[in-house]
Image: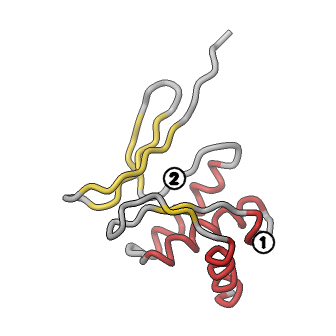
């Protein structure tokens, strides 16, 4: 019987190369990404992110948050309310872990629905 393993996504900001994302798997393999996912629907989410990242190279802060919400919504085929999401960010200009309030999440959800 094989022991359980875990997948881990590491995110950091490098002064020379900017934002960095690495993902490790239970075998110890790790790789850098521009966008990745983990979990049951990781293949669908990774495909969604690949398509979005091929179309555009540079995302501003709001576009990044909205793309993440849109990815989750598309993959899970669900429309979210602000109370159903938890979003936290670390910005290079303000390098502190910030958890969004429901009002901030609702602003992003409204912007997504208006864009569609």
| Place of residue 7 in the rendered image (x, y in percent of width and height, measured from the top left) | 55, 35
Q: In the figure, is residue 22 to the left or right of 72?
A: left
Identify the residue at horizontal 63%, vertical 65% (top origin): 71
Residue under pointer 1: 81
The relative height of residue 72 versus residue 60 in the rendered view (above or below) is above
**24 to the left or right of 101:** left
Quadrant of residue 30 within the rendered picture: top left
Residue 15 x, y percent position in the rendering: 22, 59
Q: What element carries label 1?
A: loop
**Quadrant position of the N terminus in the picture:** top right
Element type at marker 2? Answer: loop
Which numbered disc, 1 or 2, marks the residue that appears first in the sequence? 2
Vertical comparison of 39 with 44: above or below = above
Residue 51, x across and y down, in percent: 54, 67
Residue 36: mark: 2
Q: Which of 5 and 103 is in front in this view?
A: 103
For residue 78, what is the image quadrant? bottom right
Q: Residue furthest bottom?
A: 114
Q: Is residue 73 above or below residue 24?
A: below
């Amino acid at each position: 019987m094989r022991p359980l393993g875990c997948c881990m996504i590491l995110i950091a900001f490098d002064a020379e190369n900017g934002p960095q994302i690495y993902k490790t798997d239970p075998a110890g393999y790790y790789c850098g990404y521009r966008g990745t996912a983990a979990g049951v629907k990781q293949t669908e989410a990774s495909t969604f992110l690949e398509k979005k990242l091929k179309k555009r190279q540079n995302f501003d802060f709001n576009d990044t948050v909205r793309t993440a919400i849109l990815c989750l919504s598309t993959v899970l085929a669900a429309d979210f309310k602000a109370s159903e999401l938890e979003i936290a960010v670390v910005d290079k200009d303000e390098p502190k872990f910030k958890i969004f309030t429901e009002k901030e999440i609702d602003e992003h959800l409204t912007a997504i629905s208006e864009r569609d």
